[in-house]
Amino acid sequence: MSLRSKFVAGAAAAGLAATTMAVAAPAASADEALGTTSLAEALGVVPGSGPDFDRNPYDFDLVTAAIETVLEVKPNSPVGLLANGSAAATAFIPNDRAFQQLARDLDRANKWKYGFFRVNEKRVFNFVASLGVDTVETVLLYHVVPDATIDKKAAKGADGAQLATAQGGTIEVDVRSKKWNIIRLIDNDPNDRDPYIVRSKFDINKGNMQIAHGISQVLRPIDL
């Protein structure tokens, strides 16, 4: 079975198995109504505009390009939730370094071509795109928790929570330190490093119904 087939089939099975274990996500509390700026707008997602790569490995060019690619090919994809600012959602968005690490891990024979200190964003994106739009869609949906606006405060109080994702699987919140804002997210791949929320990237699009947190690794919906 190809990597693409394994990813899609395994992720679908994992999602079905995990659905019954999902618990409600903690929601942020606010004194005033939240805005409706979507995450797609906040990230500058423009389907059909093409990738916009740079030399900064700690921004979100690759996840933005992935969202654009899915919505361009599948405009009715559930990923479109991120463009609907009136629908509450929380996204954990991997930085460009995280996608580089994923490409190096899945394509070990060619891992050096994706860069080392500097991320070769174009090559990383081409590898991710080669997995197929359905796989990219599945992975993106595993990073989105619908129907909940989980800000940093709420996340710090969610130790042990199983967050139900738009893909159907769950992510476990592991609060390692409330004082130092250290939060790990446990995915469905037990053999690889789990991502942490980047402490300088909490609460992207704060004040709106859709909020995001930058993370250090790509969440994996299956054991690869």
Image (tube, rainbow, N blue to C red):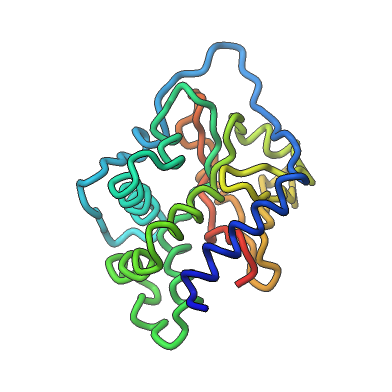
In the image, residue 61 sits, relative to residue 119, either above or below, namely: above
In the image, residue 32 sits, relative to residue 85, either above or below, namely: above
Q: Which residue is found at the position 72% from the left and 51% from the top?
A: 18
Q: Which residue is found at the position 66% from the left and 58% from the top?
A: 14
Q: Pick the quarter of the image with the C terminus.
A: bottom right
Residue 100 horizontal/vertical position (percent): 42, 68
**In the shown orientation, is residue 23 left or right of residue 50?**
right
Q: Camera-side residue: 6 or 89?
A: 6
Residue 99 figure quarter: bottom left
Q: From this viewpoint, which residue is outermost toward the bottom? A: 109
Q: Camera-side residue: 198 or 103?
A: 103
Residue 79 figure quarter: top left
In the image, residue 135 sits, relative to residue 158, either above or below, namely: below
- Residue 7: in sight, yes or no? yes
Q: Camera-side residue: 131 or 220?
A: 131
- Residue 183: in sight, yes or no? no
Q: Which residue is found at the position 51% from the left and 18% from the top?
A: 34
Q: How many marks?
A: 0
Residue 58 horizontal/vertical position (percent): 41, 56
Residue 82 horizontal/vertical position (percent): 43, 36
Q: From this viewpoint, which residue is outermost toward the left? A: 49
